[in-house]
Image: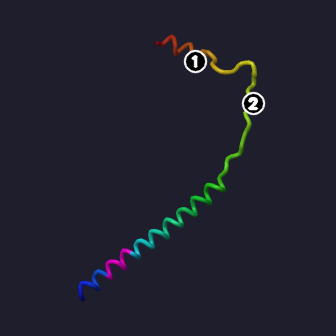
Amino acid sequence: MSDSKKETGKQSESRRQFLKGLGVAAAASAVSTVASTSAQADVVEVKPEDKTASGYRETQHIRDYYDSL
């Protein structure tokens, strides 16, 4: 075999590996797209029980933490 045939063989092999990689990447992309569109979360509206009490609340747990400092 001459050197030019060996180089062509190497180029052909690397081209095959590249095309295999493209196929795997395309399949992974398709699976990821299907998974992300089919797994959508439901929107749940959370209503606070007491609308006047919002923000910081000092609970017994918080008071115990402050006492430990």
User: Secondary structure under badge 1?
Assistant: helix
- Who's the residue at 32% across and 82% down the image? 8
Badge 2 or badge 1: first in the primary sequence: 2
Queried whether the magenta region covers residue 9, the answer comes back as: yes
Q: Is residue 20 above or below residue 9?
A: above
Relative depth, front residue between 5 and 24 = 5
Magenta residues, start to end: 8-14
Describe residue 42's horizontal placement relative to residue 35 as left or right: right
* Residue at x 75%, y 25% (from the top left corner): 49
**Occupied quadrant, residue 48:** top right
Q: Determine the residue located farthest toward the top in the rendered image.
A: 67
Task: From the image, give the main secondary structure of the stretch colored magenta.
Answer: helix
Residue at 57%, 18% in the rendered image: 61
How crowded is the residue under tag 2: few (<14 C-alpha within 10 Å), some, or many (20+)? few
**Neighbourhood count class around disc 1 (C-alpha, 10 Å): few under 14, some 14–19, many 20 upward:** few
Kind of residue at badge 1: His
51 vs 21: above or below: above
Q: Amino acid at mark 2?
A: Lys
Checking the image for residue 61, the label placed there is 1
Horizontal and vertical percent for residue 14? Answer: 36, 74
